Image (tube, rainbow, N blue to C red):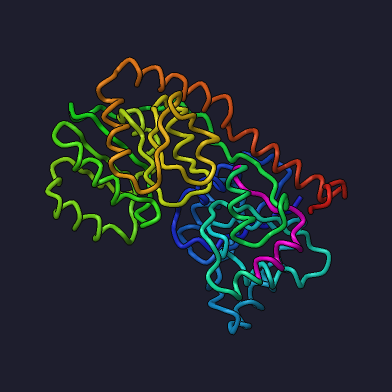
Amino acid sequence: MRLLVVTDAGARGGAESVLGTFLEGFRDDIDVTVLGCTPDVVEWLASRRPGTQSVVLPEVSDRSDVRGMLRHRSAIVAARPDVVFFNLSTMSSCQWVMAAALTIPGLPLVAMENSPVGTWSALSARLKRWTSRKLAAHVTVGRQAATIIEGLGGLPEGSLSVIYTGVATVELDSPPRTTDDFTVGMLSRHDPVKGIDLAIRVVAALGDGYRLVVVGDGAERPNLEALVAELGVADRVELRGWDERARHVLGTFDVYLLPSRLEGFPITVMEAMQAGVPVVATEVGSIREAVEDGETGFVVPVGDVDAMAAAVRRLAEDPELRTRMGEQAQEVGLEKFDAAAAVAAWEDVFDQILDGTLPARP
């Protein structure tokens, strides 16, 4: 089976990490080519699976970029794929490339929606509806995420199926802790939607004895550094930058904080749960399909700094509760969110497409 994977991601985020895990796990008879616009992203994805071919082309800018669409169409034809897999970091990702691919007769396309970040414009929304109808399979990361995306995109109810992405189970090799402060942690790119600014305000509200550690990077970093200085918490906020071993740092966190303003089903929450770290998360996307409020962590309203701070403080002041929640989170994370199940589900989708047994979509 020849599988062409398409991404227009400009940086590595959760959607690309999930895709990398899939590429590592797909069975050996699947030959993969990765097509994308950002060399670092494409090369990193290709490195996750030995023998993967890679193609880098400039991003299609808009509907007037006919030459760009034709370049991508030619690259897709040249790869001779049996199936094309579009990995969408937002609802508007890859739209023009997908439209170009749909002009290739008999080529089945599938799309994975990783986030309910909406379409750019009225034209983008129309294009979303049209491309969605043409897909062999349209999949997202959780039941509530599917409902949100269908609503935002004006898509038929039930038109998105669900495959929980999961994460690979790994044995953590945590570095030594360097502080006695109660440590609130995040693994996140620096993007306004991720709410790192809210996390900084949470730690400022909690006061001395509480520390925030954020592993990740991005264009929002200067603004976050300015906020840290403004609130006078430079001694208790660490913006550590990208780390290939970021997941291993989870073992040094007392609580995992997800203060996001919008999400689909964040993989970092699954990773934290597998690491046995209780989670405090805002009610975004399919988060309640992972975090059971009061059992494996706490779910609070989006943007509510006081509620986040109160949940963190409660866990800090009740070590027995924190331990119990961490143990339950780990049990759920290992049982429910193993990436091997997601890999097998996607392989089944590909096989059903090729043998003509995939059920029709609404």
Q: Quadrant of the C terminus?
A: bottom right
Q: Is residue 179 above or below residue 145?
A: above
Q: Is residue 353 left or right of residue 274?
A: right
Q: Is residue 257 left or right of residue 36?
A: left
* Residue drawn 25% across the image and 55% down it: 224
Q: Is residue 36 above or below residue 252?
A: below
**Residue 162 in picture, x, y percent from top left:** 66, 43
Viewer-closest of 91 and 14:
91
Residue 138 belongs to the span the image colors magenta: yes
Viewer-closest of 326 and 297:
297
**Residue 47 in picture, x, y percent from top left:** 52, 49
Q: How many marks?
A: 0
Q: Is residue 223 above or below residue 343?
A: below
* Residue drawn 32% across the image and 32% down it: 311
In this picture, which residue range is highlighted in magenta?
127-142
* Residue drawn 25% across the image and 39% down it: 212
Residue 187 belongs to the span the image colors magenta: no
**Residue 255 in picture, x, y percent from top left:** 33, 31
